[in-house]
Every structure is written in structure tokens, then in C-alpha cells.
Amino acid sequence: MPRVLVVYGSTDGQTRRIAERMAAVLVSQGQEVQTVDSAAAPADIAPGDFDAALVLGSVRMGKHQQALADFVRKFRLELDAIPNAFISVSLSAARNKPSAQREVAKTFQHFVTRTGWRPNARLAIAGALPYSRYTLRIRLVMKLISWMTGGDTDTSRDYEYTDWELVEDFARRFASALVQAPIARAVAEELQLH
């Protein structure tokens, strides 16, 4: 049974929810999973002790959490040595416009540059706009950004844009690839021997 590390950085809780949903799917597919908040990672955590890793981070003001970047930078070589994927959660991912897609790509590239990590796979997932959880200052900034991009501006309610079917499908495909990878390696080794 493959052991998968799911490490996340979440500002308002949506990325934590996505990480937990992916972890649940992995468990349902026969994986053993440990979920870790990068801001409170146990001192003895070692990604090299796992067979694979999913790294999830939310974006605020164009950047992922510092704690997540620090975690990935610290364990970059261990993450590179196992199958891995990076899932970036942002409001830009909810918009199907070229400018939004450029912003998503720019944010991915910034994280890669910051950490030196080159994930095997990556996915952009739409997050949420939880106005009720924001301080007054953040609520006004997020409302302005949302207004400028044609998004939701009614601060009396929260908005969730996450495509949960996409989240679950990605986790299932990741689990399937982990199960098939050892078989593929064994077949390749067998073919090389003869």
C-alpha cells in the first residue's frame, strides 16, 4: 500500500478542505495518507519516508504561503525523489479568461522559482471567496479585486468556486498512477533483462 504525504498551506481554510477531500479519495483508493499543515508540520516529518506527495497551496495577492514555500524548499530533494504533484488554489483559476490563465501560470512559476522545486504534475483549482472570514481591510481589498476582474462583490455572503469533481478526479488519477507505476517499472526491468 503506497504511503502518500498530503501537505498544504491554507489561508482561509478552502485549501485545507481540498487537501482533506483529496486525502479521503486516496484512502478510498487504498493509499495510506498523512495530511500535514505546512505551518504546523511535525519536526520529524520527512517526505522521503513516503512513496508520493501532493503539495497544495492557496494564493493570496499573487503568492503562496511562506510556510509552504519554506517546507518545499527544505524538502525539495526528497520531493523530487518521489512521485509528486503541486495543486495551486486561487480565484484566478475560477475565471476562464486569458488574463486569468496568465496569472495562474505566473503564480506557478513564482512558486517554482522561490522553491527550486519542479513538480511532476500540477493543477490549478478554483478556491473560494469567504467574505465573512475576512477582516474589514482584507474584505475591502478582495471586493475591489473581485470587482476589477468581474467577480462577485456582495460581501454579505461567501462564494465557493471549487470544482469538487475535478478535485476528486485528480486524486483518483494520482492514486491510479501510483498503483500502476511499480508494475510499469517491473515490466520495464523484465524487458531489459531479456
Image (tube, helix red, strand yellow):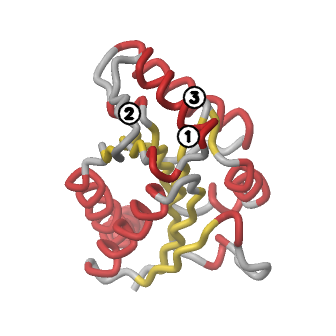
Mark 2 to mark 1 CA distance (whole Å): 10 Å
Q: Residue furthest left?
A: 165
Identify residue for label 1. Answer: 59
Residue depicted at 37% across the width and 62% down the height? 188
Q: Dot 1: within a 10 Å radius of its alpha carbon, few (fewer than 14), some, or many (20 or more) residues?
A: many
Q: Quadrant of residue 74?
A: bottom right
Where residue 135 appears, x then y in whole percent?
60, 46
Front in this rendered view, residue 159 or 34: 159
Q: Quadrant of residue 41?
A: bottom right
Residue type (three-letter) at the residue carrying disc 1: Val
Q: Mark 1 falls on what kind of element?
A: strand
Residue depicted at 63% across the width and 55% down the height? 80
Where residue 12 appears, x then y in whole percent?
53, 54
Front in this rendered view, residue 44 or 159: 159
Where residue 33 appears, x then y in whole percent?
46, 80
Q: Identify the mark at residue 93; answer none if there is no mark.
A: 2
In this view, the mark in front (3 or 2): 3
Q: Identify the mark at residue 141; answer none if there is no mark.
A: 3
Residue type (three-letter) at the residue carrying disc 3: Val
Q: Quadrant of the C terminus?
A: bottom left
Is 140 positioned to the left or the right of 125 in the image? right
Nearer-N-terminus badge (2/1): 1
Mark 1 to mark 3 CA distance (whole Å): 14 Å
Residue type (three-letter) at the residue carrying disc 2: Ala
Front in this rendered view, residue 100 or 184: 100
